[in-house]
Image (tube, rainbow, N blue to C red):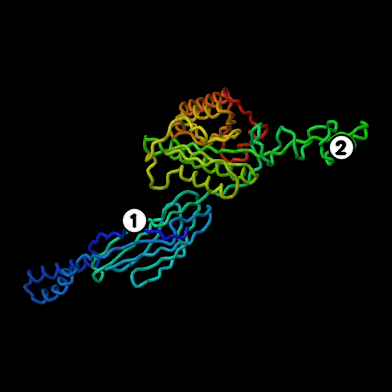
Amino acid sequence: MSTSSREPGAEAPRWRPSPLAVTLTVLASAALISAVLWRRVEFVAFAAPLLGALLNARSPTGQVSVSSDRAEEHCFEGETVDLAVTVTVSGCAVERISIAGVDVDVTAATVTRTSNGAMRHCQVYTPAWGRFAPAVTVDLRACSGLLAATVVRHPVRLRVYPRPEPMRTAPRTAELPDRIGAHIGRRLGTGVEFAGIRPYVPGDQLRMVNWHASARRGRLHVTERLAERSATMVALIDAWMLHSPGGACPPPVRRACSLAVAGAAQLTRAALRRGDQAGVIALGGPLRWVRPDIGRRQFYRIADAALDAIPAAGESESSHAGHGDVLPRGILPPSALVVAFTPLLDGRIATLLNDVRLRGHAVAVVDVLRELPAHGETDPLVGTMWRWERTTMYRNFGLLGIPIVAWRQDSTVDEALAPLALRPLAVRRPSP
């Protein structure tokens, strides 16, 4: 994206007396008071030019605009982005340009003065993934420094994608779509996995003939192999608690939802690298989903939808009302595996996942809540009841036929999903 970004409208700044104007006012007032007390004309002569300068200091009618080369910058966590911010002013001068942001570090800044403003080049380091809007603070001066103003703008949006780690586990369904891939299916076809030996029939290819078996049995036999198929993976992110109207979300829940986004990105990235189709569904606020597809560009579509599920710094968490507890039909392709990353704090998630299972999809759950509530850590009885409730929830999911695993501390999503990769997940046939 190479179009220039500018905040809506160039607005006139709100001017205030500068420290220089305050100093001149104090000196002029002291000189006039001294002239009255000691009846000395010299003090009036000293205060006259100061008062003349202060009376001639009128608010300029100029405007200020802050723009950048790009409306958005995209990068991965741990990378450095070069930013160029241009400040255009009229009727005043730029004194200082500073850039700061939440969870970003600004270094190596240089300011270039121009005839009608200034331009600042800097480097922004992004140690964590998320959506950020660095604040550009412009200090202005006018009337020979007697008036000052401060303008804060957000001309650049940063979209920092999580950096997924390689995965070895590959949970999949027992029935795979009829697409060539890297998973060993149940149907016979062209592959490398041995399925059996049968007598030769007209139409079999010569390269399928098993000459050792044919020599022992006195007639031609061919080797059957299992077909290699690709899977369809859909990661579901439960961020309902971040958009609840009850107020600010507790830090443990925010960390759990951030962990859900990171796990979904890592799972879909691994699926895309295997040649599988991958998609995402983000719950919380307006429903966001990306249909399963293949290719490198699909990962960026998934990452954008996942980032939008987490409110950015300074964004209202309950600004959008969530949808119901049922997904619209048609957003999940047949034989798709749905892996839900959820803190299991909203009762609607169980109803939604059961509805998905009844539609004929395999469903698995990853519990991303690693910390107890604050009151559960201080009160042993509350902590015990909390663990008992989570155990009961695990049992209820098991009764529904939905496997559930916990993503514990000091473990990767690869290790958390390892129990799901031991055997293919069964798909429930939808009732007619």
Q: Which residue is mark 2?
A: 210
Q: Nearer the viewer, residue 37 or 233?
A: 233
Task: Identify the residue position indicated by label 1 in the image.
Answer: 8
Displayed quadrant of residue 171: top right
- Asked which quadrant contains residue 24, the reply is bottom left
Q: Quadrant of the C terminus?
A: top right
Residue 198 coordinates in the image, percent (x, y): 83, 31
Q: Tell me residue 411's x, y (percent).
A: 59, 40
Observer-side mark, 1 or 2, equals: 2
In terms of sequence position, does the residue under pointer 1 or pointer 2 come before the other? 1
Q: Residue at x 58, y 47 (%)?
A: 164
Q: Nearer the viewer, residue 343 or 131?
A: 131
Q: Position of residue 401 (x, y in %)?
A: 59, 25
Secondary structure state at the residue bearing disc 2 = loop
In the image, 332 versus 344, the foreground residue is 332
Say what amino acid the circle numbered 2 marks: Asn
SS class of the residue under badge 1?
A: loop
Residue under the point 58% across and 25% down: 430
